[in-house]
Image: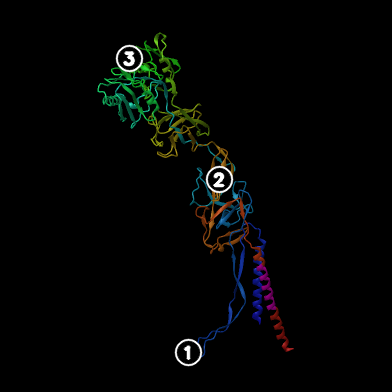
Amino acid sequence: MLRSLFSGVTGLANHQMKLDVIGNNIANVNTVGFKSSDLTFREMLTQTIKGASRPSGGGPGGTNPQQIGLGSSVGSIKSDFSQGNMQITGIMTDMAIEGEGFFTLSDGETQYYTRDGSFSIDGAGNLVNPSNGFKVQGVLANDQGEIQHGRRLEDIVIPTSLVLPARATSEVQITGNLDASSDARGTITRSNSFYAAPDSTDTLLSLRSQSGIDAGIREGDVISISATIDGNDIESEFTVSAGSTLQDLMSSIQTSLRSEDPGVTLSLLSTGEIQVQAGASDINELSVQISGNTVFNSAFSNDVVIEAGSTGLTNDQLRIPAGSDALLSEMYDSSGSPLNITDDIVISGDVGGSAIDSSTVTFDPATTTMGDLLDGIREAFNITFGSVELDSSGRVVINGDVGGNFSITSVDIAQTGGSTTSMNSVFQFTDIQEARNAESYTVSSMVYDSLGNTHDLVFSFEKLYGQNAWTWEASMDGVETIVSGGSGTVQFGDDGLLSSFSFDGSDNQLVIDPGNGAQAMNIEIDPGEIGSPEGLIQFNRAFSINSEDMDGQALGTLESMSIDRTGVINGQFSNGSNRDLAQIAMSDFNNPGGLSRVGENMYIESPNSGQPRNVFAGANARGVITPGELEMSNVDLAGEFTEMITAQRGFQANARIISVGDQMLNELVNLKK
């Protein structure tokens, strides 16, 4: 009976403790980073009245032990480290851990661990827990903004007076496209066409009509030849090949006519007409035609009767584009009219905006050729690298020397004595291309000296004529002086990609004296990787060069900060630079439930928690940091209220055990009355 009283007492005490745990959970339902606890019971030692017996062979069976329990005790009080909900605060120094891990704090002697990330910056720039001033631990960046892990944790300190010292530029990167079509150009101008009467050895494919229209004869064309002699019809065909000459056609016509009149002969006149000499018979309705070719058929139409012993023509005058060996006295214009040159030819014009000295080509009708005139034009305009020649259409094409200084702005070719002939119209020149210098492109980059002063560094690029190469030159328009390495050559392959970037002489970097007391600037020029499309390239598209200072900066003061999900604190400075300042560390434990609570949302290491492992979010941590948010308590109110009810009922039941035991003792006492 007394045992039941003591068992009830243990039940009362244990359920009281359970209610204490529930009360603490509910009290911290809105505590930042709070982790709820759960209490479990266990049975106390029991009193054995009779032990168990073993079954005997052939005898009685075994018996179970007879034991009476002595009540209950607290089995464990476990912390629930499940994730709490996030609450957005928008405050930069508020942080929450999403996943496992703890923030690490220090009072200078002991390290504390917490899920409460409501931090602030104190007057000395320390990142602290504002309720107790404990400092947040992590790793500070070095002077270059590099965060090196593996070091001991230290206090996170971000002085508001932090400055970035000025740093001289040591590297400039140049990227983008240099227009491949930026060569220097020379003037291209051409005249109207010149024509000459054909020679019997000229090919049929080159023939033109009297007015200069292509006769349209093509390889494989079939020329039909027909006539009537002495009442007999003659028909034959001539198939044009690539090498068929006018003489071949004339021979074919003559052979066909001689089949009825052996006395027929054909000859080519100097005017470009084919003359037929009839033999003993009249030649009627001589026809030389190509089906569907109106130009050729019109030139060769002839319905005239060629009487016996007389001559006649089979066609109009034929022409071919003039060649350089053709006599000027035998030239024709595009209308078929002869040039009628009778006097010497005077050549004049303008080059580079100034009139040239006129030049005269002496004319001899028996010897002066188109080639002589072309030579005269070349000499008159002092063309050294260009050319003056006839194209396939008989036009004089003048290719002037490259560059704006050699721009040909007018060409005047006329006969001396003011003679007016059709040559004045045929020598009307039409500009095909204007001369220009090689296009030059510039791009500037703002660079810094060791005192933080800015300077404009300008790069100029000019294409080398006829090459996949450019010269480059660096310049500055202030008090600066380029000491060395200020020019060179950039070479591209036939694929448009960079093949080399060189300096003139033995230089390998650009050296500048700022001229203001600062140190000399030694600048590496980075045009990109050889053969890569990421750096300098050369394609036929618009110029798009960019130049960028890669590492120089002016003096900068800290203006603002931000924290990313890895816990890195990044500072934004007045000079436009960003630099990592520190990284907040996290601690991880093999058994976080073994940590000891010390109040104020903090824990300390215990013998059963395991030693802390310093980790960093985004690297070796199992959690990440969410800036601008706080983790709320993970207390489940519905569950706590349910547990409260069960604790209350358990307490009531144990109290009833004590009450019933008391009544039974009272009855026992009353037996002697």
| Label 3, residues with CA under 10 Å away: few <14, some 14-19, many ≥20 | some
Image position of 512 (left or right of 225): right
Residues at circles 2 and 3 in contact by the CB criterion of under 8 Å: no
Q: Which residues are magenta?
A: 642-658
Residue 229, x across and y down, in percent:
30, 24
Q: Which residue is mark 2?
A: 570
User: Label 2, label 1: how many angstroms apart (C-alpha)?
Assistant: 83 Å
Residue 465 colored magenta? no
Residue situated furthest bottom in the rendering: 58
Q: Which residue is mark 3?
A: 368
Residue 637, x across and y down, in percent:
66, 63
Colouring chosen for the image of the structure: rainbow
The correct choice, above or below, for 564 with respect to 39 in the image is: above
Which is nearer the eye, 551 or 164?
551
Image position of 78 (left or right of 245): right
> Under tag 3, what secondary structure?
loop
Q: Earlier in the sequence, mark 1 or mark 3?
A: 1
User: Label 2, label 3: how many angstroms apart (C-alpha)?
Assistant: 86 Å
